[in-house]
Image: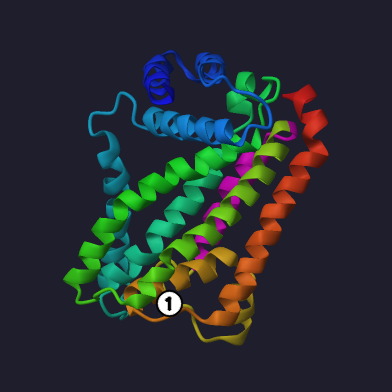
Amino acid sequence: MISGATTSLLTGARRGQQDFAGPVLMELGYRPRSLRHSFDLIRVLVRRDFTLSYRRSVLGVVWSLLLPLAQLLVLALVFQMVVPLKIEAYPAFVFGGLLPWAWFSTCLSTACSAFTGNRDLVLRPHFSPPILLISNTLSHLITYLAAVPVLLGVLSWYGRPLTAAALLFPLLTLIQGALIVGLGLIAATLNVFYRDVQYLVSVGLMLLFYLTPVFYAPPAVPAYQLLYALNPIAVLVVGYRAILFDGVLPDGFPLLLTSLMCAAIGAAGWLVYRRCEHDLFDTI
């Protein structure tokens, strides 16, 4: 029933995102305040986003593995041969931070157009636009998780077996998801009123990449430690690396502080959206 309708709708997605909006709601029999239908809608939107990402691509989902591997190759060549950082098992070290960073940056880059690019869907009665940010985060999470087996293979190749600390992976993913949805909701809402936001997000991500220990280890400098503690994605990247690369638990206090910050950012995203909700429908 739902799944059959979903399949036919995804086929219909070839006509484009805007034509896709109406049939999705009608086929799901969407009603307001229905939690089950909200989950069904999110599932359909995740599948739509994932399908559209690789539509008319020869290699399809393989690109989700090739792109981070290509970036890993460049970083490994530069920081092992050109400017050696002298970090043991450097490819495994980098890949453990590169994948969560890619999930974070890709979600934020695409979040800016979540409302403006789905105008027909946003203007539908009883449709909750924040669902678009959740589906955007989950569709890119699939890409992230698809690359995890490759990461495990690289870790094994460099003699870094998994330990019980890896059981914290779902918790770190959940915390990062709250961070992404909160920031994405702020960016998507403000981008409706000021299209400069999408460019500011691009610039901010470029700068944040160098302020986040993706390809280097955090230096033990007090000034940097403060900057690092105020950067949630930096704490999360270090946390992923601790449980997967080092096989130990991440530091408790920075992770707790980051969890509270991510929850606050998620709440702030919702408040920004609610404050601008009325004007958003008039402006979009």
Image position of 199 (left or right of 75): right
Q: For residue 237: magenta?
A: no
Q: Residue at x 20, y 74 (%)?
A: 158
Specify the amino acid type for callout 1: Ala
Give the labeled residue for mark 1: 217
The answer to whether residue 73 is seen in the rendering is no
Q: Quadrant of residue 53?
A: top left
Q: Position of residue 54 (x, y in %)?
A: 34, 31
Q: Which residues are magenta?
A: 193-212
Coloring applied to the structure:
rainbow
Pick the quarter of the image with the N terminus: top left
Q: Residue at x 38, y 51 (%)?
A: 144
Pick the quarter of the image with the C terminus: top right
Q: Nearer the viewer, residue 228 or 145?
A: 145
Q: Position of residue 131 (x, y in %)?
A: 60, 36
Q: For residue 202: magenta?
A: yes
Q: Residues within 10 Å of mark 1 (few under 14, many from 20)?
A: few
